[in-house]
Amino acid sequence: MKRFVSLVCGFCLLLLITVSLSGAEESPLLSGEPYELGPGDVLDISVWKDEAQTKTVVVLPDGTISFPLIGEVMAAGKTVGQLKEEIRQKVSTFVPDPVLTVIVHQVNSMLIYVVGRVNNPGRFLLSTNINVLQALTMAGGLNPFAKRDKITIMREGAGETKIFTFNYDEVAAGENLTQNIRLRRGDVVVVP
């Protein structure tokens, strides 16, 4: 009997791991894709055994940070590892073999906007990946005057704005779920 219970527990554990991993494939944060820094993020940067080279910095709106000895460095769009290596290379001209640490202290750049006929329109700071339906829920849901089949998502990138359509009733009914896209930094959900 104990062996049977152990087998059942092992099978359940395997099933939970499989379900967790299959869900992780949908989300860059959960699948291990590195986070790209953006304006507003707060970073702790330090060079080991050098107090003068320890600093908390904010990524400025133009995407840069400023660090002692090396001046301005572009941080936006880079992963923590890429930024760390760039700073390490630049600092190494002043400090031999620097041991550098870069930590994201606070994520402030993952903003989306929900505007129009929702109960609580505004900007929302994200700590995880969400889809359109989740964003509408964060905004308090649709008000009675919303045009549920004419919702759009605006996404800027590469010098152009892409527009995606979203029909609330279809997605809520479990139909045409491909329109329930994952939102990215800066997306605007418009509810007419």
Image: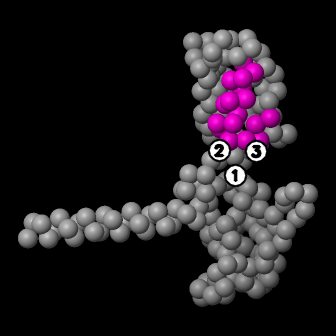
Q: Is residue 75 magenta?
A: yes
Q: Amino acid at mark 3?
A: Gly
Residue at x-position 74% and y-position 79%:
166
From the image, state whether disc 2 or disc 3 is nearer to you: 3
Q: Amino acid at mark 1?
A: Met
The residue that mark 3 highlights is: 77
The residue that mark 1 highlights is: 110
Alpha carbon of mark 2 to alpha carbon of mark 1: how far? 7 Å
Residue 4 in the image: state x and y as whole percent.
14, 70
Q: Amino acid at mark 2?
A: Val
The residue that mark 2 highlights is: 107
Left or right, 60 with respect to 1, comes to: right
Residue 19 in the image: state x and y as whole percent.
43, 68
Q: Dot 1 lies on which element?
A: loop
Alpha carbon of mark 2 to alpha carbon of mark 3: how far? 14 Å
For this rendering, which residue is in front, 89 or 125? 89
